[in-house]
Image (cartoon, grey):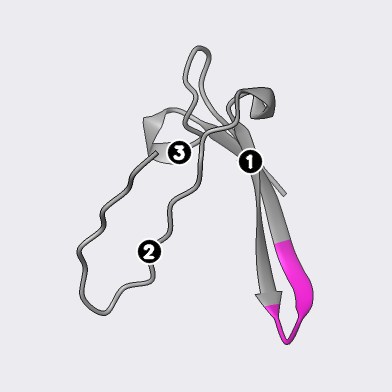
Amino acid sequence: MKVVILSRNKNLYSTRRLKEAGGADIRCLVIGGKVVAAMKRQGAEGEFRSNLHRGGSAEV
C-alpha cells in the first residue's frame, strides 16, 4: 500500500484497512500519556469506512 499526502500545517495519518475490524474503529484522545476520552465508530452496512458523515454511528 502506497500513500502520498501533501499538506500544510495539518496532522495527517494513514492506516491500512483491516478486514477483521468489520468496518469499526476505536478513537482515543490521549493527554499526558493517559486516555481521557474514547469512542467506538461503526461504519454503515456494507461500508468499510466508519466515517460519521458517510452514515456511520458512534458510541462513547
Q: Amino acid at mark 1?
A: Asp
Local SS, label 1: strand
The answer to whether mark 1 and mark 3 are in CB contact below 8 A is no
**Furthest-bottom residue in this view:** 32
Majority SS type along the magenta span: strand
Which residue in the structure is indicated by mark 3?
A: 51
User: Does residue 42 lie above or below 3 as drawn?
Assistant: above
Which residue in the structure is indicated by mark 2?
A: 12
Name the residue at 34% across, 44% down: 2
Badge 2 crowding class, 10 Å Cα cut-off, few under 14, some 14 to 19, many 20 or more, is: few
Which residue in the structure is indicated by mark 1?
A: 25
Badge 3 crowding class, 10 Å Cα cut-off, few under 14, some 14 to 19, many 20 or more, is: some
Local SS, label 3: loop
Name the residue at 54% across, 27% down: 43
Name the residue at 47% across, 20% down: 47
Which label lies toward us, 2 or 3? 2
Q: Amino acid at mark 2?
A: Leu
**Furthest-top residue in this view:** 46
**Furthest-right residue in this view:** 34
- Which residues are drawn in magenta? 31-37
Task: Give the Cα separation between the discs numbered 2 and 3.
Answer: 16 Å
Task: Give the Cα separation between the discs numbered 1 and 3.
Answer: 10 Å
Q: Which mark is residue 2?
A: none
Give percent across and percent down for residue 42.
60, 31
Which comes before the other along the chain, label 1 or label 3? 1
Which label lies toward us, 1 or 3? 1
Q: Nearer the viewer, residue 10 or 51?
A: 10
Q: Is residue 25 left or right of residue 9?
A: right
